[in-house]
């Protein structure tokens, strides 16, 4: 009998890639997604890749009645991966309540139902945003680096969510959670059947870059070349979405098989390498043979200078390591963009 995993936000970018890996690993996947920032085509994409159509429910996880109804009819859920959340940093500054409501209310609702319906295992999508700009002595950043005051309401929802889980576990000893702190997820499935599909103008570097090369945007703005980094542009740890997805399968197995050492664990998911914006552009050009039209503009407000992961804890404890090179990820992102645009 296959074990059933609920993937919230499974039509989204990381959720769809993780659903593919879960199905390939032999799990039954059930997706809940309200499609507010995703496309139902991704569910078809998951089926095309795996040959299996995941069960799909379209509703908002802030809806107490629909969520309760779902749990009462699906009492065989073995574990939950909770992706569904808003994630645009800039938007969260302008619309904080939208973020606090959606990201927090849905989490509380899910955990309450986990307790009521005795679902014990949760993998939570967290972010390296909890570290803010670490002091130089904490770079590369480990899980022990101090959590910094959040730079945005979005970031704060991730910190508060981790706290909610940590507090709830104290009085609910059966509940086990692994929080995965993602660095910068990029790339697409090698088939180019699923990938990142931002609605409107992309905020993130890679979709903006690929849309520029595809001709949808005139030029890519590089936000700042006066940072204290070797080439002056900001540094991040770009992690391939397929590698990231694999870590979720490992986290699920760890929880289901009681291999977790504490009831609340958290891991950095990155490559361990820092790359600057200009590195990304150069690597993209080499990997794809395409020129990127870009210009240097002033820094973007709220951006941090540099952060990349120390992944030793995830490497040793989870037995997981990122495998995909930056060039391979950028090539898959470009192949996906070409497919979406019919190029
Ligand atoms: N950048 C550009 N031009 C662009 C877009 C981005 O130069 O058009 C630069 C940014 O200034 C930054 C880097 O590319 O230096 C990466 O920017 P992204 O917007 O892709 O990603 P961020 O690192 O700003 O944000 C990501 C996630 C957030 C998360 C944050 C944590 O998108 O969800 O990491 O640090 F909160």
Image (spheres, rainbow, N blue to C red):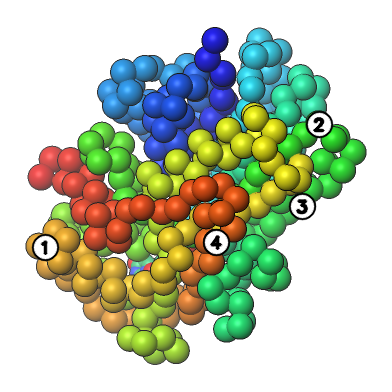
Q: Which residue is mark 4?
A: 312
- Vertically, is 225 above or below 161? below
Q: Considering only order in the chain, which callout, 3 or 2, is on the residue closer to the N terminus?
A: 3
Q: Residues within 10 Å of mark 1 (few under 14, many from 20)?
A: some
The CA distance from mark 1 to mark 4 is: 35 Å
Q: Is residue 1 left or right of residue 295?
A: right
Which is more foreground, mark 1 or mark 4?
Answer: 4
Q: Nearer the viewer, residue 293 or 324?
A: 324
Please rate how many residues cluster around mark 3, counting C-alpha atoms within 10 Å: few if below 14, some from 14 to 19, many from 20: few
Ranked by sequence position, the earlier of labels 1 and 3 is: 3
Determine whether label 4 and label 3 are within 8 Å by CB: no
* Image position of 206 with respect to 242: above or below: below
| Residue at (44% x, 89% y) in the render | 228
Q: Is residue 61 left or right of residue 89?
A: right
On screen, residue 59 versus residue 329, left or right, reads right
Q: Which residue is mark 3?
A: 163
Residue 290 is labelled as 1
Determine crowd level at label 2: few under 14, some 14-19, many 20+ residues with C-alpha closer than 10 A. Answer: some
**Closer-to-camera residue (300/337):** 337
Q: Residue at x 58, y 34 (%)?
A: 252
Q: Closest to the observer: 147 or 1?
A: 1
Image quarter of the N terminus: top right
**Mark 2 to mark 4 CA distance (whole Å):** 28 Å
* Label 1 vs 4, first from the N-terminus: 1
């Amino acid at each position: 009998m296959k074990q059933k995993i609920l993937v919230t936000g499974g039509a989204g970018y990381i959720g769809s890639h993780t659903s593919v890996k879960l199905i390939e690993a032999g799990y039954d996947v059930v997706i809940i997604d309200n499609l507010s920032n995703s496309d139902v085509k991704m569910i078809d994409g998951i089926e095309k890749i795996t040959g299996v159509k995941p069960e799909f429910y379209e509703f908002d996880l802030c809806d107490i009645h629909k969520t309760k109804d779902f749990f009462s009819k699906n009492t065989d859920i073995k574990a939950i991966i909770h992706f569904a959340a808003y994630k645009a940093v800039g938007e969260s500054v302008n619309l904080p309540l939208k973020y606090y409501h959606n990201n927090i209310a849905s989490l509380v609702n899910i955990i309450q139902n986990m307790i009521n319906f005795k679902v014990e295992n949760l993998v939570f999508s967290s972010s390296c945003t909890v570290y803010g700009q670490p002091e130089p002595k904490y770079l590369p950043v480990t899980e022990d680096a101090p959590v910094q005051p959040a730079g945005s309401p979005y970031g704060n929802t991730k910190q508060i969510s981790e706290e909610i889980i940590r507090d709830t576990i104290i009085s609910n000893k059966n509940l086990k959670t692994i929080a995965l702190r993602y660095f910068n997820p990029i790339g697409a499935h090698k088939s180019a059947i699923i990938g990142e599909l931002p609605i409107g103008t992309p905020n993130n570097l890679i979709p903006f870059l690929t849309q520029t090369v595809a001709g949808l945007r005139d030029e890519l703005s590089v936000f700042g070349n006066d940072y204290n980094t070797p080439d002056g542009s900001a540094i991040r740890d770009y992690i391939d979405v397929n590698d990231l997805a694999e870590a979720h399968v490992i986290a699920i197995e760890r929880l289901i098989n009681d291999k977790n050492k504490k009831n609340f664990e958290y891991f950095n998911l990155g490559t361990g390498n820092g790359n600057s914006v200009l590195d990304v552009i150069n690597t993209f050009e080499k990997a794809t043979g395409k020129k990127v039209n870009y210009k240097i503009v002033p820094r973007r407000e709220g951006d941090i200078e540099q952060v990349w992961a120390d992944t030793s804890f995830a490497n040793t404890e989870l037995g997981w390591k990122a495998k995909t090179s930056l060039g391979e990820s950028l090539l898959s992102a470009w192949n996906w963009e070409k497919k979406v645009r019919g190029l």
